[in-house]
Image (tube, rainbow, N blue to C red):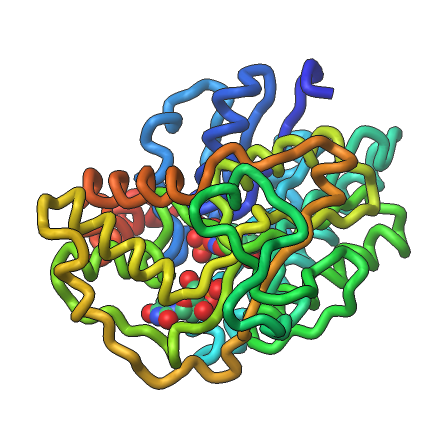
Amino acid sequence: MSDMKRSIIITGGAGFIGSHVVRLFVNKYPEYRIINLDKLTYAGNLANLKDIEDKPNYRFVKMDICDFEAVYKLMQEEKVDGIIHLAAESHVDRSIKDPFTFAQTNVMGTLSMLQAAKTYWESLPEKYEGKRFYHISTDEVYGALEMTEPEGIEPPFSTKASSGKHHLAYGTKFFTEDLKYQPHSPYSAAKASSDHFVRAYHDTYGMPTIVTNCSNNYGPYQFPEKLIPLFINNIRHRRPLPVYGKGENVRDWLYVEDHARAIDLIFHEGSIGETYNIGGFNEWKNIDIIKVLINTVDRLLGRPEGVDMDLITYVTDRAGHDLRYAIDSSKLQRELGWEPSLQFEEGIEKTVRWYLDNQDWMDNVTSGDYQKYYDDMYKGR
Ligand code: NAD
Ligand code: TYD
């Protein structure tokens, strides 16, 4: 399929994961037309895509996914045959404060994208043939797993991501594709609802959909409200590190470029109507990651390693804080041959270096200046 000309809308392309997906597709497929549809909320930043913004196969469109008419017209105008849908509100803490925005964007926005694609594709003589609606979701829809082995056990699987010094699983159960959805936060509840709508469009209208559920991503260009970039920046500036609860919660971490590679593979070779879980079999307790971050930032800044451990500040736990996420991605490995390419320690080193080397990017997003710049630029369009 990759030798065909394609016209693909990537929603949320100015965000963290979306910008890596847009960059990969624009560079790897010069014969494709890649349309980045993004509303540029606080989390969307076109500076994430400076290196590819002048490429002839790339177009940015500032648009709200909830604006059905505008999205439908864009699909017609660009003769879109593929959609990779990432746009969403993505931060659990924000969803606890403002659940309505999450329902609006993640549920109604996804429905608007589905209905626009349905209306456009059903108007064509070939209808759904050669089309793809690929919805990007999260492992958080499955709820939380128990920690049956608090000290950690040898994991039943391993991948490149998990084959470093730290090599533990914190329970015997993993998220598999057939598991019941049990979301706990307003964020995961809204994502779960959007996943159900995508499957409903497949089952009811025959829309060629694919859903993937991925574990926590880390890497360059992540908005510094999320654990890893927030803490790297705080350690640099010797600000307190607010650890929720006891720091015992477990997440399964994947380098963002490995997620983007999985999206590329699944978009082209995944089976219609299927769900694939994406993860690295790479579980870490928050507190252990935080210690790695402190040691790495200290070392790279020429400070004595570990001198900043006293920044760790235990604070009130997040409401409804899910204890453990752990993805079983063996279906994706078995059926499509995907594997993470980076060991966690390598990925963290690359990530810390990137944030330390790109302090301008960090200052820009934390001051909100980039938003004012682009608001002025797109005023009246
Ligand atoms: P992000 O918050 O960094 O970026 C979201 C992007 O969506 C931003 O560019 C924002 O401007 C855009 N957006 C928000 N509302 C919009 C709207 N109404 N119309 C158009 N654009 C809008 O998010 P992220 O971390 O890159 O996550 C991207 C997707 O991947 C989300 O669907 C998320 O649920 C999923 N996901 C994220 C992770 C993770 O660890 N970050 C893990 C698994 C799945
Ligand atoms: P986060 O990056 O918000 O991702 P998610 O909630 O989607 O997993 O948080 C990762 C983990 O780090 C999660 O268990 C909550 C915890 N955390 C803190 O302890 N302190 C913080 O300031 C933040 C943002 C997160």
Q: Is residue 201 above or below residue 91?
A: above
Q: Position of residue 381 (x, y in %)?
A: 40, 45
Q: On the rendered structure, is 86 left or right of 110?
A: left
Q: Is residue 213 above or below residue 262?
A: below
Q: Is residue 378 above or below residue 78?
A: below
Q: Position of residue 221 (x, y in %)?
A: 35, 45
Q: Residue at x 75, y 30 (%)?
A: 269
Q: Position of residue 104 (x, y in %)?
A: 57, 69
Image-quadrant location for residue 267: top right
Observer-nearest of 228 and 344 = 344
Residue farthest toward the left in the current orientation of the protein: 303
Q: Residue at x 65, y 47 (%)?
A: 157
Observer-nearest of 102 and 235 = 235
Q: Where ligand 2 lies, by image quadrant? A: bottom left
Q: Quadrant of the N terminus?
A: top right
Image-quadrant location for residue 93: bottom left
Q: Is residue 282 above or below residue 152?
A: above
Observer-nearest of 115 and 187 = 187
The number of callouts visible is 0
Q: On the rendered structure, is 333 left or right of 214?
A: right
Q: Is residue 39 visible?
A: no
Image-quadrant location for residue 180: bottom right
Q: Residue at x 24, y 76 (%)?
A: 313
Q: Is residue 97 visible?
A: yes
Q: Residue at x 30, y 46 (%)?
A: 374
Q: On the rendered structure, is 320 left or right of 303?
A: right
